[in-house]
Image (cartoon, rainbow, N blue to C red):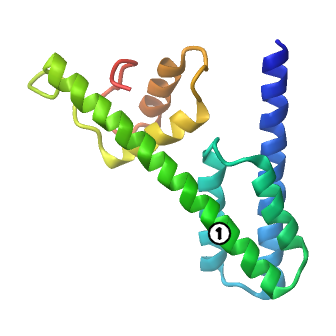
Amino acid sequence: RDAAAVAGAARRQREDAVARLRDSLQAAADRLGADDEVLDGLLRDLAAVQASPTIATDQLEQVQSRMRLGSAQDLDQAVLALRRLARKAKERRVAEIEALSGADTAAASATGGGEKGGPAAWTDQELSLLSKALAKYPGGTRNRWLLVSNHINNAGVSAARRSEDDC
């Protein structure tokens, strides 16, 4: 129970840090007259960082504190730091998906999957959903693979239903 309470507190702290950073991004964009495309790109970067459990809360807080300083140079440094964090998060997510794809390929070869009657090939949308579900339900989560498969199936992007074993 104590571990769950600590994990919950850390998750809330991270969510608060992301919310403060989002607010700072929007305020800085308004203050400097940045166009919507720039702000949308930064918010996409922030979403990628938020989806990655490997990016530490203190890193998010450092970016947010730089953004509060107010000068254009501080804002540029904060944006660069956010983009670096987003790039790291995306690289880690791609590596995790590639590792899973390699394991799936080996398992399919061993079990004869991918042939007639086997599971359907994964679409890009399904792989994206898989990545998001893996971030949402990290290792150690009870019934992780059931939750991951439900996440993918409930999105409705594919006619093929994914089982726990598919994930």
In which quadrant will I find the N terminus?
Answer: top right
The number of numbered discs placed on residues in the rendered structure image is 1
- Estimate the x, y position of residue 147 in percent, counting from the top left: 53, 22
- Residue at coordinates 84% horizontally, 21% vertically from top-left? 5
Q: Is residue 90 visible?
A: yes
Which residue in the protein does label 1 denote?
42
- Residue at coordinates 51% horizontally, 54% vertically from top-left? 90
> For this view, does 141 lie left or right of residue 165?
right
> For this view, does 92 lie left or right of residue 37?
left
**12 in relation to 124, above or below:** above
The one nearer the camera, 55 or 14, is: 55
- Estimate the x, y position of residue 20 in percent, counting from the top left: 84, 57
Q: Quadrant of residue 115?
A: top left
> For this view, does 154 lie left or right of residue 69?
left
The one nearer the camera, 93 or 137, is: 93
- Estimate the x, y position of residue 76 in percent, counting from the top left: 73, 81
Q: Is residue 119 visible?
A: no
